[in-house]
Image (spheres, rainbow, N blue to C red):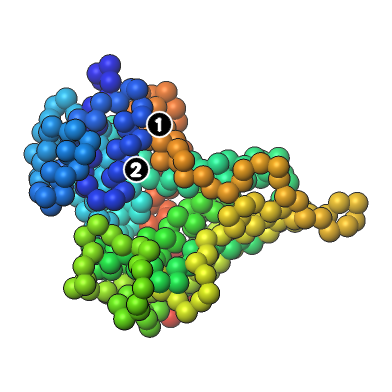
Amino acid sequence: MHDKINVGVIGAGSISDLHINGYLQNPDVRLYALCDIDSELLEKKALKYNIDKKYTDYNEMLKLKELDAVSVCTWNSMHAPCTIAALNAGKHVLCEKPMSVSARDAQLMKDAADKNKKLLMIGFVRRFGNDCEILKDFIESDFFGDIYYTKATYIRKIGNPGGWFGDVKRSGGGPLIDLGVHVIDLVRYLLGNPRPVSVYGATFDKLGDRKNIKGKRVYKSAGSSDNDICSVEDLATAMIRFDNGTVLSVETSFSLHTKNDEGKIELFGTKGGARLNPELELYTEANNYLADISLDADTALSFDGLFSNEINHFVSCTKNEARCISPADDGIEIMKILDAIYESAKTCREVIL
């Protein structure tokens, strides 16, 4: 390992900016190379960040012996091929969520990491948020008692980003695999990563990407256009049961006839409950009275430094200074859940894991 870790980024879309800025802020990293199949986008991003080594073929970039690690920031269907190639080339990998488009591909990625004795970390960035840290503090102090029921909601009123996000061949799915993965993983992480045992899910494609709607589009991917196809669900819902008896109810959408966007999680335990929406509220009993608690602290998720926290952890793990808190094993479990939800939606039956 060099005095500084030489890092390359595969995929120059919007999410890459968050990775790149995190690396640039880390004194132990040298941003070394960039790759994207879109040569125009590649040139633009390389110029923005003053990156000399530019590639349109990730296999060519991975031939750089001095490259120590890579971030994989491609569309979802390329996560597995890029990650496996990087691991086989002897590089550590931080792969964006979701880990892949199937649990099978996710397992192949972990197998490559194990074979090459390299780190494979999955970009579950919500694990590195201030809100997660506060909630874990209360859970570990037994504020909630036995948490037996949880809810996770990530709803957009009109939020299909277009581009590859709406193309199931590249994305693997719609809001479930793009948005739901964040809150499903956050709840599971807060619960101590219990094993999923059964899933019942449903998906709907009633509204599509709603190109007819006039007005400003808030969510738009870098490669979106008026000719984008939409072959993903616009709403997904599921009930997930874990081996510790806890149940998680999930709702997530790109497009829904509702008043506002929502992003919240709720925990219900034998001693107390909580709602994160986005500020944290706590509910319990005090001297046999019902009590609602608000904290004198910044409990809403702060995006300032969020990805830097994740990047710093990845760098620390590559230097063997920290144990990875977002490992490949967790990515596989989440992919099993997502696979099962889509399978349940297709068969209209519960899926046993």
Viewer-nearest of discs 2 and 1: 2
Quadrant assignment for the N terminus: top left
Q: Residue at x 36, y 73 (%)?
A: 215
Q: Give the side of residue 331 with respect to residue 258, left or right.
A: left
Q: Residue 210: x, y in percent?
A: 33, 78
Task: Tell me the quarter of the picture where residue 348 sits.
Answer: bottom left
Spot the residue most to the bottom: 206
For residue 214, side relative to residue 116 (left or right)? right
Amino acid type of the residue that numbered disc 2 sits on in the rendered structure: Leu
Marks 2 and 1, Cα distance to the nearest angstrom? 12 Å
**Image coordinates for residue 295, horizontal then vertical, percent:** 71, 45
Query: Measured from the top left, where is residue 226 in percent x and y?
Result: 21, 72
**Residue type for callout 1:** Asn
Given residues 306 and 83, the one toward you in this image is 306
Q: What residue is disc 2 on?
A: 18
Q: Quadrant of residue 297?
A: top right
- SS for callout 1: helix
Residue behind mark 1: 312
The secondary structure type at the circle numbered 2 is helix
Instruction: Give coordinates of residue 338: x percent, y percent.
Output: 40, 63
Q: Identify which residue, 51 or 318, lies in the foreground.
A: 51
Q: Is residue 38 left or right of residue 208?
A: left
Q: Is residue 273 visible?
A: yes
Image point 19% across, 33% down: which residue? Answer: 50
Q: Residue furthest front?
A: 215
Q: Residue at x 10, y 45 (%)?
A: 57
Q: Vertically, is 100 above or below 348? A: above
Q: Dot 2: within a 10 Å radius of its alpha carbon, few (fewer than 14), some, or many (20 or more) residues? A: some
Q: Earlier in the sequence, mark 2 or mark 1?
A: 2
Asked if marks 2 and 1 touch (Cβ < 8 Å), the reply is no
